[in-house]
Image: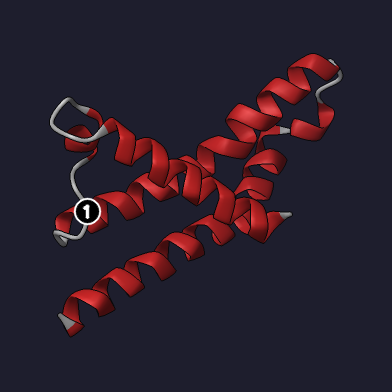
Amino acid sequence: MGRARLLHGALLVAALAAWWISDHAITPWVQEIAGYERIQDRDLSVLLGHWVFGQLPRVLLCVGVWLVGTHLGLLPSLTQSLTSGGSWRRVVVSGLIAAAVLLVFTG
């Protein structure tokens, strides 16, 4: 029981670290490399800024943490979580809780 808690705690720390690193290091780096600040069209800037240059690096790192959690047996596989074998209610509730926690940290 103690080892499992320690591993779950480490996974939580890894997820928070992935979010922080992507937000403070990787996303600005990607924006700089891609020339995001030179986009003149405001609509395109907002769309690309949010989806491509903002969310994509975060999502990729978080999926990486999830895959590590799956490999360690701490999390279900991505496929298992999103198929009929998983509980959609649990996925939605945990996603909303995670979003609320991140809003508290970033707000």
Q: Percent x, y for residue 49?
A: 70, 30
In the image, taking residue 17 as reference, residue 85 lies left or right, namely left
Q: Position of residue 62 (x, y in %)?
A: 41, 49
- Residue hosting label 1: 75
At numbered mark 1, what does the secondary structure look like: helix, strand or loop? loop
Relative image position of residue 100 (x, y in whole percent)? 57, 49
Crowd tier of the residue under label 1, counting other residues whose Cα lies within 10 Å: few below 14, some 14–19, many 20 or above: some
| Rendering quarter of residue 5 | bottom left
Residue at left offset 63%, top offset 46%: 27
Against 41, residue 54 (above or below) is below
Asked if residue 60 lies left or right of residue 22, the reply is: left
- Taking depth in this image into account, of 91 and 56 the one nearest to the observer is 91
Q: How many marks?
A: 1
The residue drawn where x is 69% and y is 56% is 106
At label 1, the amino acid type is Leu
Quarter of the picture containing the N terminus is bottom left
Q: Quadrant of residue 21?
A: bottom right
Quarter of the figure that contains the C terminus: bottom right
44 relative to 75, above or below: above
